[in-house]
Image (cartoon, grey):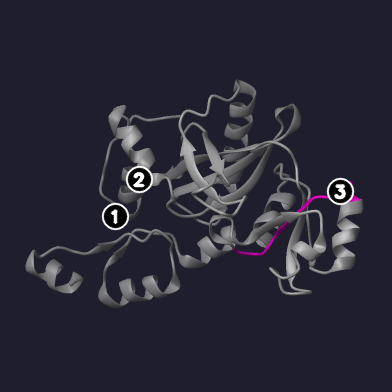
Amino acid sequence: YIKKTSHHFSHISAIISFKPSGKISHICQKNNWILINNPGKLNRLFENKFKFTKICQKNKIATIPSYIDKFNLNNFKKYQKIFKNKSLVIQKSFGWAGKGTFAGSQFRKIKNKISLNSLVKFSPKLSGFTLLNNCCIFHSNLIQSPPALQFTGISPFTKNPLATIGRQWPCLTSSKVKNQIKIITNQFSQILLQHDYKGFFGLDFFVGQKEKVYLLECNARLTASFAFYTQIELKNNIIPLFLLHLTEFSQIPIKINRSE
Protein backbone atom coordinates (compact mmCIF):
# COMPACT_ATOMS: atom_id res chain seq x y z
CA TYR A 1 0.00 0.00 0.00
CA ILE A 2 2.80 2.43 0.89
CA LYS A 3 4.67 1.74 -2.33
CA LYS A 4 1.58 2.15 -4.53
CA THR A 5 0.40 5.29 -2.79
CA SER A 6 3.76 7.06 -2.76
CA HIS A 7 4.42 6.13 -6.39
CA HIS A 8 0.99 7.40 -7.49
CA PHE A 9 1.57 10.82 -5.93
CA SER A 10 5.32 10.93 -6.64
CA HIS A 11 6.04 11.31 -2.93
CA ILE A 12 8.90 10.05 -0.79
CA SER A 13 7.50 7.93 2.02
CA ALA A 14 8.29 8.80 5.62
CA ILE A 15 7.68 6.16 8.28
CA ILE A 16 6.86 7.20 11.84
CA SER A 17 6.78 4.33 14.29
CA PHE A 18 5.68 4.66 17.88
CA LYS A 19 8.47 2.39 19.04
CA PRO A 20 11.70 2.02 17.01
CA SER A 21 12.80 -1.43 15.92
CA GLY A 22 15.58 -2.95 13.85
CA LYS A 23 13.04 -4.54 11.51
CA ILE A 24 11.38 -1.21 10.69
CA SER A 25 14.80 0.36 10.09
CA HIS A 26 15.72 -2.47 7.69
CA ILE A 27 12.45 -2.09 5.74
CA CYS A 28 12.95 1.67 5.41
CA GLN A 29 16.54 1.27 4.27
CA LYS A 30 15.54 -1.39 1.74
CA ASN A 31 12.80 0.80 0.23
CA ASN A 32 14.63 4.13 0.53
CA TRP A 33 11.99 5.50 2.89
CA ILE A 34 12.71 8.25 5.42
CA LEU A 35 12.69 6.88 8.97
CA ILE A 36 11.33 9.39 11.50
CA ASN A 37 12.97 7.63 14.43
CA ASN A 38 16.20 7.10 16.28
CA PRO A 39 17.88 3.73 15.74
CA GLY A 40 16.22 0.85 17.57
CA LYS A 41 19.44 0.13 19.49
CA LEU A 42 19.23 3.54 21.20
CA ASN A 43 15.67 2.86 22.27
CA ARG A 44 16.71 -0.53 23.68
CA LEU A 45 19.68 1.01 25.49
CA PHE A 46 17.74 3.66 27.39
CA GLU A 47 14.59 1.63 28.01
CA ASN A 48 16.57 -1.25 29.46
CA LYS A 49 16.04 -0.68 33.19
CA PHE A 50 19.37 -2.27 34.13
CA LYS A 51 21.45 -0.24 31.67
CA PHE A 52 19.45 2.91 32.41
CA THR A 53 20.16 2.55 36.13
CA LYS A 54 23.88 2.10 35.55
CA ILE A 55 23.96 5.15 33.25
CA CYS A 56 22.24 7.30 35.89
CA GLN A 57 24.48 6.06 38.70
CA LYS A 58 27.61 6.68 36.62
CA ASN A 59 26.49 10.23 35.85
CA LYS A 60 25.28 10.92 39.41
CA ILE A 61 21.68 11.54 38.41
CA ALA A 62 19.24 11.16 41.30
CA THR A 63 17.51 7.77 41.18
CA ILE A 64 15.86 5.59 43.83
CA PRO A 65 18.57 3.37 45.44
CA SER A 66 18.64 0.01 43.70
CA TYR A 67 20.67 -3.13 43.06
CA ILE A 68 20.68 -5.51 40.12
CA ASP A 69 20.84 -9.09 41.36
CA LYS A 70 19.35 -12.56 40.99
CA PHE A 71 15.75 -13.07 42.03
CA ASN A 72 15.57 -15.55 44.89
CA LEU A 73 14.44 -15.71 48.51
CA ASN A 74 17.88 -15.01 49.98
CA ASN A 75 18.33 -11.85 47.93
CA PHE A 76 14.77 -10.76 48.65
CA LYS A 77 15.48 -10.91 52.38
CA LYS A 78 18.92 -9.33 51.91
CA TYR A 79 17.55 -6.22 50.20
CA GLN A 80 14.74 -5.90 52.72
CA LYS A 81 17.49 -5.51 55.32
CA ILE A 82 19.66 -3.21 53.19
CA PHE A 83 16.78 -0.85 52.39
CA LYS A 84 15.27 -1.25 55.88
CA ASN A 85 11.98 -1.69 54.10
CA LYS A 86 9.86 -4.84 54.02
CA SER A 87 8.11 -3.83 50.81
CA LEU A 88 10.27 -4.02 47.69
CA VAL A 89 9.84 -3.11 44.03
CA ILE A 90 11.15 -5.81 41.68
CA GLN A 91 11.68 -4.97 38.00
CA LYS A 92 12.64 -6.97 34.95
CA SER A 93 14.94 -5.37 32.38
CA PHE A 94 11.99 -4.49 30.12
CA GLY A 95 8.29 -4.05 30.77
CA TRP A 96 5.58 -2.09 28.98
CA ALA A 97 3.04 -0.15 31.09
CA GLY A 98 4.20 -1.69 34.35
CA LYS A 99 4.01 -5.31 33.16
CA GLY A 100 7.60 -6.00 34.21
CA THR A 101 7.30 -4.36 37.63
CA PHE A 102 6.10 -6.06 40.82
CA ALA A 103 5.88 -4.91 44.42
CA GLY A 104 5.32 -6.62 47.74
CA SER A 105 6.67 -7.60 51.11
CA GLN A 106 6.31 -11.37 50.70
CA PHE A 107 8.48 -13.40 48.32
CA ARG A 108 5.85 -16.13 47.89
CA LYS A 109 3.39 -13.67 46.33
CA ILE A 110 5.87 -12.62 43.64
CA LYS A 111 7.87 -15.79 42.98
CA ASN A 112 5.45 -17.16 40.36
CA LYS A 113 5.65 -13.97 38.31
CA ILE A 114 9.44 -13.91 37.83
CA SER A 115 11.79 -16.71 36.80
CA LEU A 116 13.89 -17.90 39.73
CA ASN A 117 17.49 -16.60 39.67
CA SER A 118 16.83 -14.32 36.70
CA LEU A 119 18.36 -10.84 36.93
CA VAL A 120 16.08 -8.17 38.36
CA LYS A 121 16.35 -4.72 39.87
CA PHE A 122 15.62 -4.48 43.61
CA SER A 123 14.41 -1.13 45.02
CA PRO A 124 12.55 -0.04 48.15
CA LYS A 125 8.86 0.78 47.77
CA LEU A 126 8.53 4.42 48.76
CA SER A 127 5.57 6.68 49.44
CA GLY A 128 4.98 9.45 46.93
CA PHE A 129 3.64 10.16 43.46
CA THR A 130 4.89 10.10 39.88
CA LEU A 131 5.25 12.81 37.28
CA LEU A 132 6.38 12.83 33.66
CA ASN A 133 7.33 15.21 30.90
CA ASN A 134 7.59 15.22 27.12
CA CYS A 135 10.79 16.51 25.54
CA CYS A 136 12.47 17.01 22.19
CA ILE A 137 16.08 17.45 21.21
CA PHE A 138 15.86 19.84 18.27
CA HIS A 139 19.05 21.02 16.54
CA SER A 140 21.02 19.69 19.55
CA ASN A 141 18.96 21.82 21.95
CA LEU A 142 16.57 20.53 24.60
CA ILE A 143 12.95 21.65 24.73
CA GLN A 144 10.92 20.19 27.59
CA SER A 145 7.27 20.38 28.53
CA PRO A 146 5.99 21.23 31.99
CA PRO A 147 5.55 18.12 34.13
CA ALA A 148 2.29 16.17 34.19
CA LEU A 149 0.74 14.13 36.97
CA GLN A 150 0.77 10.40 36.25
CA PHE A 151 -2.23 8.28 37.23
CA THR A 152 -1.29 4.75 38.21
CA GLY A 153 -3.17 1.56 39.07
CA ILE A 154 -6.72 2.94 39.02
CA SER A 155 -9.54 0.40 38.67
CA PRO A 156 -11.34 -0.47 36.38
CA PHE A 157 -8.72 0.72 33.87
CA THR A 158 -6.11 -1.77 35.04
CA LYS A 159 -5.64 -4.61 37.51
CA ASN A 160 -1.93 -3.83 37.84
CA PRO A 161 -1.34 -1.36 40.71
CA LEU A 162 1.87 -0.17 39.01
CA ALA A 163 0.46 0.39 35.50
CA THR A 164 0.06 3.93 34.18
CA ILE A 165 -3.43 4.73 32.91
CA GLY A 166 -3.43 8.50 32.36
CA ARG A 167 -1.81 11.92 32.67
CA GLN A 168 -2.88 15.40 33.70
CA TRP A 169 -1.48 18.75 32.58
CA PRO A 170 -0.89 20.89 34.57
CA CYS A 171 0.34 18.81 37.49
CA LEU A 172 -0.08 21.61 40.09
CA THR A 173 3.09 20.61 41.92
CA SER A 174 5.46 23.01 43.66
CA SER A 175 8.15 25.17 42.08
CA LYS A 176 10.74 23.17 44.04
CA VAL A 177 9.68 19.96 42.31
CA LYS A 178 9.43 21.60 38.88
CA ASN A 179 12.92 23.05 39.20
CA GLN A 180 14.39 19.64 40.12
CA ILE A 181 12.68 18.09 37.09
CA LYS A 182 14.13 20.77 34.79
CA ILE A 183 17.63 20.19 36.15
CA ILE A 184 17.42 16.39 35.89
CA THR A 185 15.98 16.60 32.37
CA ASN A 186 18.83 18.87 31.31
CA GLN A 187 21.36 16.48 32.83
CA PHE A 188 19.89 13.45 31.09
CA SER A 189 19.56 15.25 27.74
CA GLN A 190 23.35 15.66 27.74
CA ILE A 191 23.69 11.88 27.95
CA LEU A 192 21.28 11.47 25.04
CA LEU A 193 23.26 13.99 23.00
CA GLN A 194 26.45 12.02 23.64
CA HIS A 195 24.73 9.09 21.91
CA ASP A 196 23.60 11.30 18.97
CA TYR A 197 19.97 10.99 20.06
CA LYS A 198 17.54 13.50 18.58
CA GLY A 199 13.82 14.17 18.52
CA PHE A 200 11.09 13.16 20.93
CA PHE A 201 11.52 11.43 24.31
CA GLY A 202 9.93 11.46 27.74
CA LEU A 203 11.08 11.01 31.32
CA ASP A 204 9.24 9.60 34.35
CA PHE A 205 9.91 10.91 37.85
CA PHE A 206 9.10 9.88 41.41
CA VAL A 207 8.49 12.54 44.08
CA GLY A 208 9.17 11.25 47.57
CA GLN A 209 9.43 12.71 51.05
CA LYS A 210 10.42 16.38 51.42
CA GLU A 211 9.67 16.77 47.67
CA LYS A 212 12.83 14.92 46.68
CA VAL A 213 12.69 14.06 42.95
CA TYR A 214 14.15 10.86 41.47
CA LEU A 215 14.42 9.94 37.80
CA LEU A 216 12.54 6.67 37.20
CA GLU A 217 12.98 5.90 33.51
CA CYS A 218 13.45 7.25 30.01
CA ASN A 219 11.02 6.57 27.17
CA ALA A 220 13.41 7.03 24.27
CA ARG A 221 10.69 7.34 21.61
CA LEU A 222 7.31 8.94 21.10
CA THR A 223 5.53 8.72 24.45
CA ALA A 224 2.06 7.31 25.04
CA SER A 225 0.85 10.86 25.73
CA PHE A 226 2.40 12.59 22.70
CA ALA A 227 -0.85 12.81 20.69
CA PHE A 228 -2.81 14.12 23.68
CA TYR A 229 -0.08 16.63 24.52
CA THR A 230 0.09 17.79 20.90
CA GLN A 231 -3.59 18.75 21.14
CA ILE A 232 -2.83 20.79 24.26
CA GLU A 233 0.01 22.59 22.47
CA LEU A 234 -2.08 23.37 19.38
CA LYS A 235 -4.97 24.73 21.46
CA ASN A 236 -2.51 27.02 23.25
CA ASN A 237 -0.81 28.18 20.01
CA ILE A 238 2.43 26.42 20.89
CA ILE A 239 4.56 24.77 18.20
CA PRO A 240 4.23 21.05 19.03
CA LEU A 241 7.21 18.99 20.08
CA PHE A 242 5.97 16.36 17.63
CA LEU A 243 6.35 18.82 14.74
CA LEU A 244 9.93 19.51 15.82
CA HIS A 245 10.50 15.75 15.93
CA LEU A 246 9.21 15.43 12.35
CA THR A 247 11.35 18.26 11.02
CA GLU A 248 14.46 17.03 12.84
CA PHE A 249 14.39 13.73 10.95
CA SER A 250 12.95 14.90 7.63
CA GLN A 251 15.29 17.92 7.47
CA ILE A 252 12.43 20.24 6.52
CA PRO A 253 13.58 23.78 7.40
CA ILE A 254 11.49 25.44 10.08
CA LYS A 255 11.89 28.59 12.12
CA ILE A 256 10.71 28.34 15.70
CA ASN A 257 10.41 30.61 18.67
CA ARG A 258 9.86 28.23 21.52
CA SER A 259 11.65 27.67 24.79
CA GLU A 260 10.44 26.02 28.02
Q: Residues within 10 Å of mark 3 (few under 14, many from 20)?
A: some
Which type of secondary structure does the marked residue at label 2 adopt? Answer: helix
Which disc is residue 83 wearing? 3
The picture places residue 174, in percent across and down from the top left corner, at 61, 22
89 above or below 94?
Answer: above
Report the magenta residues as a range: 82-94
Drawn side of residue 64 relative to residue 228, left or right: right
Image quarter where the C terminus lies is top left
237 above or below 166?
Answer: above
The picture places residue 9, in percent across and down from the top left corner, at 8, 64
Q: Residue at x 57, y 54 (%)?
A: 159
In the rendered image, which residue does mark 2 sit on? 227
Is residue 206 inside the magenta stretch? no
Who comes first in sequence, dot 2 or dot 3? 3
Is residue 91 inside the magenta stretch? yes
Which disc is residue 250 wearing? 1
The CA distance from mark 1 to mark 3 is 48 Å
Q: Residue at x 45, y 31 (%)?
A: 169
Which type of secondary structure does the marked residue at label 3 adopt? Answer: helix
Q: How many numbered circles does the render carry?
A: 3
